[in-house]
Amino acid sequence: MLRIPDAVKQDAREGQTLLDLGFKGGTKTGWERANQLINDDKIPLTDVAVMRAWFARHGPDAKNGGTSYPGYCEWINADKPLDEPLNHRGAVSWLIWGGDAAYTWLKTPSVRQALRKAFPSRKQASLRINLVC
């Protein structure tokens, strides 16, 4: 089990706030992850591994910048508009998985080492942090 950083909780809460404001985005799995990140103090390493895999597909390290991160960047670059809930599904998805805070946390040496120890045969994530919004 790893302690969930406060910044990760805050990004997930921001995603929850967008839902409350009528924004669409995310999947059932993503919303379950958001609830876990918001409400739990610790997270199992198996769930951390799933998060790492999600960010590998949806984040800036993925082919063409991923599927959720570009939408998040558009929302950020538009000064986080709250009046266009249907146009920012990527922002919601990115945030409910813990956002920039989770992406950065998953690349820390302590998390990488814990994952390597628990899952020695898994592919290792890139060390680069490619947040560019």
Image (tube, rainbow, N blue to C red):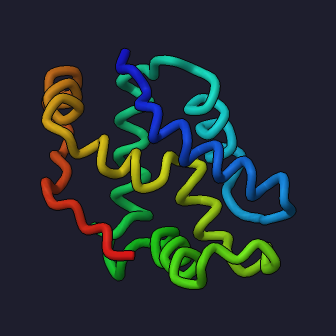
Task: Indicate whether 109 appears above or below 56.
Answer: above
Task: Indicate whether 2 appears above or below 77.
Answer: above
Question: 30 or 8, which is in the foreground?
Answer: 8
Q: Quadrant of residue 82?
A: bottom right
Task: Indicate whether 119 appears above or below 7.
Answer: above
Q: Could you tell me which quadrant the N terminus lies in? A: top left
Question: 66 or 130, which is in the foreground?
Answer: 130
Left or right, 51 with reference to 29: left
Q: How many numbered discs?
A: 0
Residue 39 lies, in percent from the top left, at: 63, 24
Residue 100 lies, in percent from the top left, at: 41, 55
| Residue drawn at (30%, 49%) of the image | 104
Left or right, 61 with reference to 77: left
Left or right, 30 with reference to 133: right
Residue 112 lies, in percent from the top left, at: 18, 35
| Residue drawn at (60%, 49%) of the image | 96
Q: Quadrant of residue 90?
A: bottom right
| Residue drawn at (62%, 47%) of the image | 30
Q: Residue furthest front?
A: 79
Question: 103 or 17, which is in the foreground?
Answer: 17
Task: Indicate whether 133 appears above or below 29.
Answer: below
Q: Could you tell me which quadrant the C terminus lies in? A: bottom left
